[in-house]
Amino acid sequence: MTADPGRPAVLKFGGTSVADAAAFERAAAIVRACRGAGCVVVVSAMSGVTDALFASVEQGSLNGLEPHFERHRAVAQALLGGATAFLTELTGARAELADLLARAAAAPPPEDRAPLRDAVVSQGERLSSALLTAVLGAAGLEARWVDARRCIVTDDTHGRAAPDIRETERRTRAALGPLLERGEVPVLGGYVGATHGGVTTTLGRGGSDYTAALVGAALDAREIQIWTDVPGVMTADPRVVSSARTVPTLSYAEASELAYFGAKVLHPKTLEPAMRRRIPVRILDSRAPDDPGTVVAAEAEASPGTVKTIAHKAGITVLQITSARMLGAHGFLRALFEVFDRHRVSVDVVTTSEVSVSLSVEDSADLSAVTEELERLGEVRVERGRAIICVVGEGLHTTPGIAARVFETIRDINISLISQGASRVNLTFVVDEARARETVARLHAALLGPVDRTPTRRMPGPTLRIARGEGFRPVEFARQLIDIPSVSGDEEPIARCLAAALERLGYRVELLDAPPHRPGLLAVTGAPPRLVFSTHIDTVPPHFASFEDEEYLYGRGACDAKGILATQLAAAERLRADGVEELGLLFVVDEEQGSIGARVANRHPLARECRWLIAGEPTENKLAVGSKGSLRLTLRTDGTGGHSAAPVGRSAIDALLAVLADVQAAAWPRDDFFGETTCNIGVIAGGAAGNVTAPDARADLHIRVATGQEPVRELVERAVRGRARVEYLSFTPAVRLTSVPGFDQTVVAFTTDIPHLSNWGTRLLLGPGSIRDAHTARERIAKGELARGVDLYARLARTVLTQPAAAAQA
């Protein structure tokens, strides 16, 4: 496809592509490479900001936004040299948000708050686009910020506004055309628009893609580029099929089906404006700008493969309406679908017979009023916990036998709501949500060829050497794990290496993405697991490589928790060799920070089928019957910056130190079972220079909680006495755990992922190593403890599998 130099490209950068200073630099380099042919930039809010803005409306407070203001400030300081016009703009945005939140709190009816909510959440895109404009300018580009509300004109349906296409195209051309003619790069925020009267609106979550397409259609762009954090559209969700690969080309029809049935790379509405003008849409990875990505183009320009990809969409409810009134009658279906229209509930898949209609909707929809109306038309049956499977490819309609291959591949899985005739490019059906991932994995293997085990750019790191049965060496395997850095936030390489190794051992592996590119994994042997071994794959910084002497294995994660992972895998292999097959391995991310990986894993459909979970942490090979809780928080103080020789105000650091002294002096509560509550001041930061009174300061605290949360928070507030801002980051309660006869017992002073894995049956805590060796500069674990850990894990598993799971854990 030859680019027309007279037509601009529209480059849209998603939230993860502007997540931090390094991401902004990559975005600037991409724009610089494109500017010679003309381009317009559309940008999303920084990742996580929109969620925080929505939460701030509910809370009526700026507290949860402070870390995100800090992220914007950090990018400006790193790339723009500190004091800039953007920082002034950031201060103004903060003041505007405070005013908007106060007004929203005073307008309780939801309909009165909707315009204010849109005004609040629009700030994310407005700030990120202004910041990117400044970064592009600092990089030598003639960039010009444009308020998207000047271009995108919508109705007044706040939260999911519909654009006025004709007026949007007219205003977009008027606002951006002159800038492009002068060789400038217009930059505008996505997601945001305004009514004809100028009231701020938003296009719905994911609407920045839609903005890019609307702008592209208005300017008759040569191409719309969606820059994200994945290499393109994949043959399946890589969290489900680790061998999924990029699809080079898709037709508009294929991409439309994927957008509506589970693929999250494209917003469903993105393709509508592009299709009208036959503009190619390219999905690209901002972390690998030279990769070709996926091109979505008109049907004649797309390669006609039989099956391109397999999508799935969980969280589906099926409704079946049965009525003899349908037989030979007209108008029944109209009356039925008018019910859904009145309640603004979208229907995905529909099948009909002479006397019944079956259809699917998303679980998030409130169906109580819908079902009440439907019951006037016939008998209604509601089935929750379903998932849509969508096999997509231009050749499906004309390829004999393809449906037979699909259903033969999954002949032991119950199927409902089969739909093929409605689209020539997809075969859609519904299965139980608990078997959706298995369905996708089987179909991918059968329809999309052999699995490619070659590591790619997205699967970095060495191949883990692993042997079956008696050949498995826990110490050797632990060393390999240690030598792959996996500090919290950078777990993807070790997760993918582990997944490949476990697949070679015969496990069926599913990657569990928490935030993007931070996958944990679940490995099962076939049947739903009755018992799961679990630990975490992230470590604290800094990484250092493995080494050993006669007694100890050293390295970051040796004790917490890569040595433990190796012993759990060794125990699982021993059990499998003895014929125990209903086993699973759950290795999660982010345990060292906020337990995001465990929270994601807790929603997995297999969780409620599991009876026992054995969590691994360094308990000195004793069975822990309790673990303390955790409260993480940040204290912030403000001062008056000035020359230290003639200070004109207070120092934020002096104020913080006074607060911290009172925090340290607090009489923290004690519990007879868990022991003392302790407080660690882990990080103190602030100030600008040695000769400047500090304008700001902060301290990060980690309190090991032996009681409930409220008494501890009351002590914090009493110690602070309003002299600092308190930001509560996370809380994990103390837990009592189940004891098992025949094992030494202990109560541990640290916090684990266990409270966040509540759906995985009865939870036990055991592992080799001592917490005294974890997180240290010479982290280590005794080799003898690893060997004993394998024996204990295997014995504990055999013991509990022969008895019923505990009804509850205190």
Image: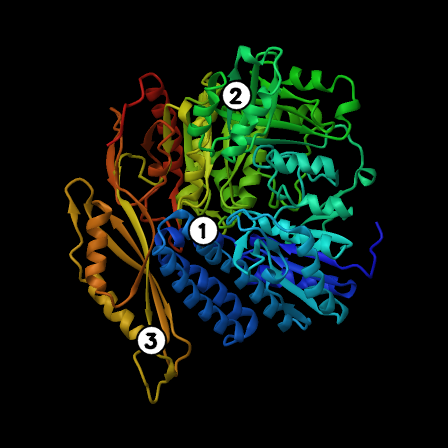
SS at badge 2 = loop
Q: Can residue 207 be seen in this view?
A: yes
Rendered image: mark on residue 265: none
Q: Residue at x 47, y 54 (%)?
A: 115
**Closer to us: mark 1 or mark 2?**
1
User: Closest to the observer: 327 or 309?
Assistant: 327
Residue marked by disc 3: 639
Residue marked by disc 2: 526
Neighbour tally class for label 2: few under 14, some 14-19, many 20 plus, Cα within 10 Å: some
Amino acid type of the residue that numbered disc 3 sits on in the rendered structure: Gly
Amino acid type of the residue that numbered disc 2 sits on in the rendered structure: Gly
Neighbour tally class for label 1: few under 14, some 14-19, many 20 plus, Cα within 10 Å: some
Pointer 3 and pointer 1: residues touching (CB < 8 Å)? no
Neighbour tally class for label 3: few under 14, some 14-19, many 20 plus, Cα within 10 Å: some
Q: Position of residue 613 (x, y in %)?
A: 37, 29
User: Closest to the observer: 231 or 781?
Assistant: 231
Q: How far apart are the two marked residues, 1 and 2, measured between alpha carbons?
A: 48 Å
Q: Position of residue 19 (x, y in %)?
A: 54, 57
Residue marked by disc 1: 114
SS at badge 3 = loop
Q: Which residue is drawn at 37% across and 75% down?
A: 695
Q: In which quarter of the image is the C terminus?
A: top left
Q: How far apart are the two marked residues, 3 and 1, measured between alpha carbons?
A: 36 Å
Q: Position of residue 142 (x, y in %)?
A: 69, 72
Rendered position, 317 above or below 716: above
Q: Which residue lies furthest to the bottom in this view?
A: 646
Amino acid type of the residue that numbered disc 1 sits on in the rendered structure: Ala
Rendered position, 429 above or below 173: above
